[in-house]
Image (spheres, helix red, strand yellow):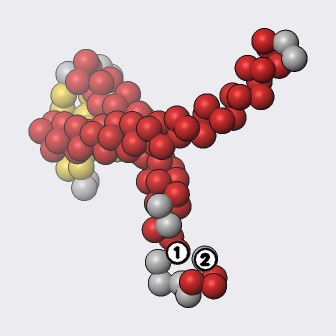
Amino acid sequence: MSIRQSARSTFPGRLLRLLPRLSLIAIIIGLGNFAWFFAESSQLGGDALNGYSREGHYFVSSHGTYTEVDRAAWEWSRMHAISVFITHPAALLGMYYLGRRRGFWSIGRRPDER
């Protein structure tokens, strides 16, 4: 068996050993990013995904209230909001994986159903 074949055959095993740590990292990053986005949106008065830009003026929105911000703040808010759409599902997948691994999803089932 060559070195390359050996690496291929052990890669799934290595990945399975790393998956709990990667899941935990995804959860921490996802929750941290969401909390940061929430605090930032509260401070700005909304987020750029719900806002708009027109004729060099940039507005963030929260619950129908628009607040004018500078372009840099609007662009950052937009990028940060998009990043939540990536990190939040990753965190949820990490939670699901760890919960599944620990038997959380089998709570309430009879022992013969697990």
Residue 107 in sight from this viewpoint: yes
Q: Position of residue 74 (x, y in %)?
A: 28, 27
Q: Position of residue 105 (x, y in %)?
A: 50, 70
Toward which corner of the image does residue 39 lie, by quadrant?
top left
Horizontal arrangement in the rendering, residue 19 relative to residue 35 (left or right)? right
Residue 49 in sight from this viewpoint: no
Residue depicted at x 23% and y 24%:
73
**Kind of residue at badge 2:** Arg
> Which quadrant of the rendered structure holds the C terminus?
bottom right
Residue depicted at x 12% and y 39%:
43
Placement of 113 over or under 55, stated as above or below: below
Residue extending furthest front?
1
Disc number placed over residue 106 in the picture, else none:
1
Horizontal arrangement in the rendering, residue 98 relative to residue 68 (left or right)? right
Toward which corner of the image does residue 80 lie, by quadrant?
top left
Q: Are marks 1 and 2 in contact (CB under 8 Å)?
A: yes
Q: Which residue is mark 2?
A: 114
Secondary structure beneath dot 1 equals helix
Residue extending furthest left?
43
Residue depicted at x 61% and y 31%:
14
